[in-house]
Structure formats: C-alpha cells, structure tokens
Image (spheres, helix red, strand yellow):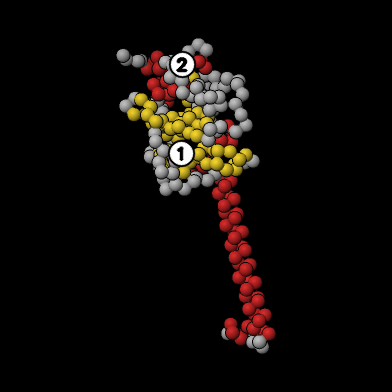
Amino acid sequence: MTISTESVTSLPDHTQLPCEDGTFVQNFQEHPQSILLTDSILPVLDAKHPDGNYCIGQDSGIYWRITDPPLKGAKAPDWFYVPNVPPTLDGQPRRSYVLWQEVIPPQIVIEFVSGNGAEERDKTPWEGKFWIYETVIRPAYYAIYEVQKASVEVYGLTIGRYELIPANERGHFPIPELGVELGIWSGLYGNMDLPWLRWWDSQGNLLLSGHEQAEQERQRAEQERQRTEQERQRADRLAARLRELGVDPEDLAD
C-alpha cells in the first residue's frame, strides 16, 4: 500500500496531541528512580552520541496509533531511551514521542510496577502493555521493575517476540548495544533506602549519579587532606625528636 506525502503530513504531530492524562504518579519513589536512571547513564549516551542525537522519556507518552480520544492510542512508559533522534523538534522540547512522525522505535522501555505486575505483563491484543510493546512499539528491550520484590525482568526482542533474558554471573542483564548492564542495587539514594534499579558498565562497575560522583570526589579529597596532615604531623614529631638529640633538622636538609 502506498501512503501519499499529503496523508502523512496531515497526521497530528507531538504539538497537537495530549502530553498528559491528569493522573497522579503512583508513589514517591518513581520520580527519583527515573532521575537516577537518567543521571547515571548520561555519560554513556553522550559518548555514544557525540552529535547529541538521542532522547530520554520519563513518564512520557509514546503514540502508536490514532484514536478518539487520542490518549487511547498512547502508552507512557516510566522510562525509555531512543537513539539517533534529535533531542528537540523544530526547536521545541518534545511533548510526546509520535511513532508515525519519528519512525525510529525506542531501544529500551522500562515500566515500574505499582500493583501486582499484571498490567505490565498484559498480552491482550490491542490493549495490553506487553502486547503493544512487543507487537507495535517494538523496543529492543522491555524491562519490568518491581521495587516491592526487589526484582527486574528484562525481555529482548527476538524474531518479533520478547524472550526473557537470563541474568549474568553478577545478577545483571546486559544491554550490549550500550555496553551496560541493568540490575538491582540496594542502598540509600536521596533519603530512601530501597532496592533501586541501576546501571553498571560491562565490567560490573556501578554507574554513579552526579551527586554520587561529587560525594566520591569529596571523600577522595578529604582522604588526601588527612594523609597530607598525617605526613606533616610525622615530620613535626621527627623534627622535635631530632632537636631533643641536639640535631638541627635544618642542617640535615642542607
């Protein structure tokens, strides 16, 4: 079937479609979780896309078909990443991601489970999230994260179907295209001690957020300051002992 240029350009774009449905975020953990995923992977994406052509969506709509009302034709993953697309359109921030306008599908879609996980695993044709991601939106990876179970399932698209990816020896799920792994990290982020969804590099090193990097650098500087102070104190004690023995430390320096 041939689609005319006129019919394509007449379709609604991201500026003409709703970008919110008025519902509440499910819990207080979801927002910092999205920020943590984005903040820690930005250096990887910046290195992979030196031209800056990629976008990240956080609880943003992906329009996959035209419906009335329009929101019935959209899914809003909690987090997703699309490679090789400009971060803005016509100089404007994206209001949503419109597949008939963009063409390139997301590479990774992540859903945060707030109920029992049935919605995220629903394979009902034309309605269920799992079916829509697998059949229409078709991200290469689909992850289902359950904070209450401290678990994540990662599916990879193989010959048009999602196959559950097994964890590696570290309990992580590799994303080879980015050289990273996805897994669960239990610890304090912000002021919440929870099992967080995190990125690691391919060697198993945790990818740190900007705050964590700054804190790590602060601790390193503090350790260096303490080491310098300890060396100065040892030098002062040695100089004092030499003077007790009648030796001028300045003479030894000469």
Q: Is residue 56 visible?
A: no
**50 or 229, which lies in front?**
229
Quadrant of the image containing the N terminus: top left
Quadrant of the image containing the C terminus: bottom right
Give the secondary structure at mark 1. strand
How far separated are the C-alphas under marks 1 and 2?
27 Å
Pointer 1 with pointer 2, Cβ within 8 A: no
The answer to whether 250 is drawn above or below residue 189 in the figure is below
Q: Which residue is mark 1?
A: 182
- Amino acid identity at mark 1: Leu
Residue in the image at 35% along x and 15% along y = 3
Residue 127 numbered tag: 2
Residue in the image at 61% along x and 63% along y = 225
**85 or 75, which lies in front?**
75
Q: Position of residue 248 (x, y in %)?
A: 64, 85
**86 or 179, which lies in front?**
179
